[in-house]
Amino acid sequence: MITALYPGTFDPVTYGHIDIATRASCLFDRLIVGIYDRPQKNITFTAEERVEMMRESLRHIPHVQVVSYSGLTVNFARAHGAKVLVRGLRAISDFELEYQMALTNQKLAPDIDTICLMTTLEHAFLSSSIVKDVFRSGGCVQQLVPPHVITALRAKIVPLTDPTEPARGQQDESKS
């Protein structure tokens, strides 16, 4: 039985994260999604909120466990019996950082391998930061995150513009 760990901040979870987790769950007997609780990182949602959003997003997959953790990822992986770390790659720029992290993790834990899954084309541009920026600017994020994440975003972030109002420079034709 092979257990894999898919670690990340997931602040918030996106359809890209869900895609990687879903595909990884087909490759391993058990998948742990580790929500990294790093207090020094500027995050919008608490670890508990991110765990709940991810659980709701992955509830259709029976052998996935979602938990938060802090400290070294390889130590968390070992403590949970994970022999593989799963990482998602969007672009070549992601590869450089992921490669450095994989080599560091290999030095720290030679018994744990890292595999990278390429994102699907439709999610290649997607990141949690982009979701928050689009939402904060009053843009629609329905194609980027599940409905329960939109609800969570509404509770945490006040958009700079009302997404129901016409964009600046546009006139409501019903008033003409």
Image: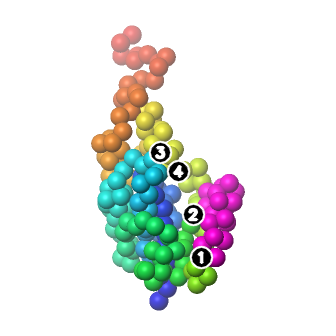
Q: Which amino acid does the dot numbered 2 rest on?
A: Gly
Q: Disc 1 marks which residue?
A: 108
The reply to whether dot 3 and dot 2 touch (C-beta < 8 Å) is no
Q: How many C-alpha atoms fall within 10 Å of the one at disc 4: few (<14), some, or many (≥20)?
A: many
Q: Nearer the viewer, mark 1 or mark 2?
A: 1
Q: How many C-alpha atoms fall within 10 Å of the one at disc 3: few (<14), some, or many (≥20)?
A: many
Tell me what residue is drawn at x 43 percent, y 80 percent. Answer: 79
Can residue 58 be found in the magenta stretch? no
Q: Disc 3 marks which residue?
A: 131
* Left or right of residue 9, residue 124 in this image: right
Q: Which amino acid does the dot numbered 1 rest on?
A: Leu
Q: Disc 2 marks which residue?
A: 88
User: Which of pointers 3 and 2 lies earlier in the amino acid sequence?
Assistant: 2
Residue 128: x and y in percent read: 48, 50
Q: CA distance from mark 4 to mark 2?
A: 11 Å
Q: Quadrant of the C terminus?
A: top left
Q: Quadrant of residue 124?
A: bottom right
The reply to whether dot 4 and dot 2 touch (C-beta < 8 Å) is no
Can residue 105 be found in the magenta stretch? yes
Q: How many C-alpha atoms fall within 10 Å of the one at disc 2: few (<14), some, or many (≥20)?
A: many
Q: Secondary structure at mark 2?
A: strand
Q: CA distance from mark 1 to mark 3?
A: 33 Å
The reply to whether dot 1 and dot 3 touch (C-beta < 8 Å) is no
Q: Secondary structure at mark 1?
A: helix
Magenta-colored span: 88-108
Q: Disc 4 marks which residue?
A: 127
Above or below, comparing residue 73 to residue 52 in the picture: below
Q: Quadrant of residue 53?
A: bottom left
Q: Which amino acid does the dot numbered 4 rest on?
A: Ser
Above or below, comparing residue 93 to residue 158 in the picture: below
The reply to whether dot 3 and dot 4 touch (C-beta < 8 Å) is yes
Q: CA distance from mark 3 to mark 4?
A: 6 Å
